Image (spheres, helix red, strand yellow):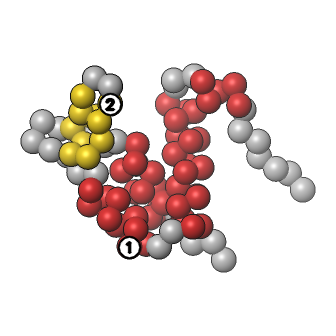
Amino acid sequence: MHHQVMDSTRINQPDSLAMNDLVEVAARFLVRFSEPASLQRLLAAHTPDSTGHCATCRTISGAAPWPCQLHAIAKHALRAPTPG
């Protein structure tokens, strides 16, 4: 049996591939442990404001750019197959 292992050194690298891996892991967690209605509420809360930033997320420097990571995770989770 082959298990895919995420390279832990990539977690500290700010590249998009490592971020995509983290989004996928978080989305799989949501698919397994949450209801679809929860994912819809996440998407509804994390929408762009009039300046193109997430209406909900904040960073140290102010509003987070949209789409934020929570929006990306919820959207990915909604497209993922349901575990069976």
Residue 74 in sight:
yes
- Dot 1 amino acid type: Ala
Q: Earlier in the sequence, mark 2 or mark 1?
A: 1
Horizontally, is 38 left or right of 53 in the view? right
Q: Quick one: label 1, few (<14), some, or many (20+) residues within 10 Å?
A: few
Query: Dot 1: what SS?
Result: helix
Residue visible at 26% across and 60% down in the picture: 44
- Quarter of the picture holding the C terminus: bottom right
Query: What is the C-alpha distance between the residues marked 2 and 1?
Result: 26 Å
Which of the labelled discs sits on residue 53, or is there none?
A: none
Rendered location of residue 70, percent (x, y): 40, 48
Rendering quarter of residue 60: top left
Number of marks in picture: 2
Residue visible at 60% across and 49% down in the picture: 25
Which of the labelled discs sits on residue 59, or is there none?
A: 2
Which of the labelled discs sits on residue 37, or is there none?
A: 1
Residue visible at 46% across and 55% down in the picture: 76
Check the image and name the residue furthest to the front. 60
- Dot 2 amino acid type: Thr
Query: Dot 2: what SS?
Result: strand
Placement of 53 over or under 42, stated as above or below: above
* In front of the other: 56 or 68: 56
Placement of 31 over or under 54, stated as above or below: below
Residue 81 in sight:
no
* In front of the other: 60 or 8: 60
